[in-house]
Amino acid sequence: MKGLLCSLVTIVILALPVGLTTELISVYGPDALARNASSDLREQYLSRQQLTRKLVSDRQISPSSIDDWEWQALRSLNEPLPLELPYAEQWLLFGSETQVITFDISATQNRILEITSDRQPTAQGGMFVEIFEPMGERHRVVATSNPTDTHLRWPVSRTGTYRIRVQSLPGSVGAFALTLDEQFAFEFPVATDSPKPVQSFFGMPRDGGRREHHGIDIFAPRHTPVVAATDGYIARVATSTRGGLHIWQRGSDEYGNPIGSLYYAHLEDTHVSAGTWVNRGTQIGTVGNSGNAISTPPHLHFGLYQRSAGPQDPLPWTGLARQATLTIPNGHRWPAWVSIARESVNVRTGPGTEYAVETTIDGGELVALQAATSGWLRVRTGSGVSGFLADTLVDPPTPQPITLQGPTQVQASPDPSSPILIELVSGTVAARLGRFGNARLVQTESGLQGWIIDPVAITSDERPS
Ligand SMILES: [Zn+2]
C-alpha cells in the first residue's frame, strides 16, 4: 500500500504514457491460450508476467511493490464473489493502493462474454482483466484484456462457471465504469423493447402439420425497424407468396467467418438492396405482415439456414428479447472511507438481500469504498473481507473531537508499514473519523488525515472496544 500523500505524487508519475498501447499489444502470449485462440484473440492476450515486467521496466511499479501486487491478485482469485450477469459498477480509485476483485459468473456456450472498463474523462490509469476457466482444483487463464484497451470480448467455449479477476494498474485514480455482460451472438433483429416479442417458435407445425416452422416469429407494431442480426452481404431482396417482402443476408461473425443465410420475411418495406454490405445492427427494413402473414398481426419471421445442417433454430443466437443496456451507477462523489450509519450492518457476497451474509460490522466502523453498483456499494472491511452493503447504510465519516494522551504517530494508511505523515505531541486536539480494524482515522486541526495504528495511543474520550 502506498500512502495518502504519496498518492498525489503517484498520480503524476504513474500516468500511462500514450505509447504504451502499441508496445503492450506487440507482446503475445506463448502458452496454451495462444495455441487455442483465433488470431484476433491472440492479439488481445497479455500474460500477467508480461504485464508485470512491462510495468517494472516502465517504472509504473517499484520492484518492492511487485510482491504486494501479485499477492493481492492471488488472494483475490481465491476469494471470488458470485455474480449474476449483466452487472455494472463504478470503480473509485484513489491512487493510494491497487484494487483487485474477482467475480464468479455463469456463462453459456456460443455466447460472448463482454467486459468493459471505461475510464471516465478525469481518471488516469487502467485495469487488467483476466478470465479464468476452472480446471479441476485450479484455474487456467483463457483471455486477458490489454490494460489500455477498455474492451474484452470472449466467445464462451462451453457452458460453465468462469472466474473474472479485475485489478487496477498501480497509481490509477478516478472513476472507472466496469461492466460484465453476456451477449447473444446475434443482434436481436427487431428494435422492440417488448419483454416477450417472440410468440412462435422453431419446429411448430405449419399447414396442418405438412411442414414445420423454420424460424421464429417476432411480433412488433407495423413499421418497427428490422435490423441486421450480423454483419454480411445482402444476397437478395424479393417478394414471394409465402414470405411476402423479404431479405436474404449472408451472415458472418465478428471475425469474418460465415455463419449461414439469414432470412427476414413479411416485411412492410426494405432499406437495402442486393449486393450491399451491412453491419450488425443496421436497419434493413421494417416489420409488416406481407405474404402469407396478411391475416396475422405484423411480425418478423426470422430464419437461419446453414449449408451443411439446413434450417436452424435462431433462438439460441438471438435470445427471447432485445438485451437491455446496462446503466452505470454514479458513485464518484463518495469519499474513500465511509462510516457505518446503523448499529450493525450485513456485508453480503453480492448486491442484493438474496446473497449470503459474509460478515457483520458495527456502527461507527469505517469501510474502504471500492465500487458502487445500483443501490449497493462494494467495500472492504477492516478485517479484510470484500463484499456488498446497501448504500443507504453508510454516511461520510463524522468527526468526533479527541485529545491525544501521548506522543502519537499518524500514518498514511491503516497498514502498519505505511509511511509516517506526522508525529503529534501529547495533548494535541484532533478529530476521530472512525475505526478500521485496529486503526483509527483521524484529522488534525490543519486538515491532515491519517491513521493512528498503535493501540496504546488510543485517545481520552474513546471507549475501549
Ligand atoms: Zn414465421
Image (spheres, rainbow, N blue to C red):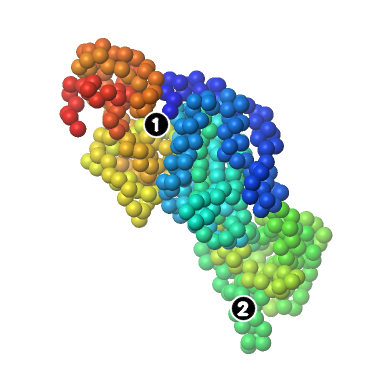
Residue shown at 36%/32% (left/top)? 337
Q: Name the residue under label 1.
A: 336
Identify the element where label 2 is drawn.
loop
Identify whether 67 is placed above or below 308.
above
Q: Is residue 407 visible?
A: yes
Residue 202 image point, x, y percent = 61, 75
In the picture provided, is 51 more to the left or to the right than 343?
right
Q: Check whether the beta carbons of the residues at disc 2 and disc 1 lie within 8 A of each other.
A: no
Residue 214 image point, x, y percent = 66, 75
Q: Name the residue under label 2.
A: 203
Residue shown at 47%/54% (left/top)? 137
Which residue is more in the foreground, 76 or 87? 76
**2 or 1: tag closer to the N-terminus:** 2
Task: Tally the marks.
Answer: 2
- Find the residue positioned furthest to the top: 425
Identify whether 297 is placed above or below 364.
below
Residue shown at 27%/41% (left/top)? 361
Three-letter amino acid code at the position of disc 1: Ala
